[in-house]
Amino acid sequence: MARWEPGTSDRLRAAALDLFVEQGFEQTTSAEIAHAAGVTERTFFRHFRDKREVLFGGQDQLELAFVTGIRDAPAGAPPLDLVAAALDSAAQFFTDERRASSRVRQTVVDANPALQERERHKLASVAAVLRTELHAHGVPEPAARLAAESGATVFSISFAQWIAPGEERGMREIADGVLGALVSLTGAGAAEMEA
């Protein structure tokens, strides 16, 4: 078996997804993933701590994309504009080339309650990172928490739409639409309360 070749992480990820779909997540071992990718199990563990990381690796990169969007936004921008900048920056992470594997990944997550919990934890982590960065940008409470939780929700809904069968729009376009729907909804609610 090859010890190192370019693209090993991608091969391991693809082999894992195939096996997870075919056998189920719990029934698949790291040794089987390594074998299917043509590497040793030791090589698998050089790339991933465990088989869950195959599905959830890249969290740090995703969170950095959200943070970068806020950091690059103009000083004094309103909280939802900062969230929009974060979503715009994170959308670059979700290229058309990633859509097919993201769809497969989500079917694996949806079939396993423990993975669903991990996915919820991932979204909570995104909200926490957004909130921290909004604080750093001068947004006080409770606006920072409301904006951060709303941003994580917009991201979650947008991602679900992005991986939906037959969907071809880019993540940025979808996120803009979902955020627009939220802004429209909150605007209508405020107007009704004032009346």
Image (cartoon, rainbow, N blue to C red):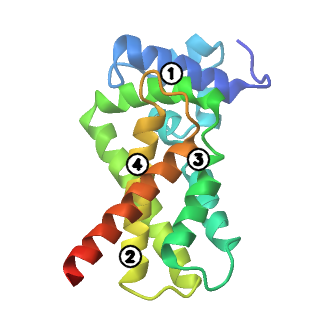
**Comparing labels 4 and 3, the label whose residue is closer to the camera:** 3
Spatial CA span between label 3 and label 1: 28 Å
Give the structural element (helix, strand or loop) at label 1. Answer: helix
Q: Which mark is residue 153?
A: none
Whether tag 3 and tag 1 are in contact, CB under 8 A, the answer is: no
Inter-mark Cα distance, 2 to 1: 36 Å
Q: Would residue 4 be found to the left or right of residue 120 on screen? A: right
Mark 4 vs mark 3, CA separation in Å: 13 Å
Alpha carbon distance from label 4 to label 2: 16 Å
Instruction: Identify the mark nearer the N-term, 1 or 4.
Output: 1
Identify residue for label 1: 16
N-term-proximal mark, 2 vs 1 = 1
| Closer mark to the observer between disc 3 and disc 1 | 3
Residue 40, placed above or below residue 46: above
The reply to whether dot 3 and dot 2 touch (C-beta < 8 Å) is no
Disc 4: which residue = 156
Rendered location of residue 155, percent (x, y):
45, 52
Label at residue 172: 3
- Name the kind of residue labelled 1 in the image: Ala
**Would you name the residue on which mark 2 appears?**
145
Q: Are marks 4 and 3 in contact (CB under 8 Å)?
A: no
Q: Quadrant of residue 136?
A: bottom right
Of the residues shown, which amino acid type is indicated by label 4?
Ser
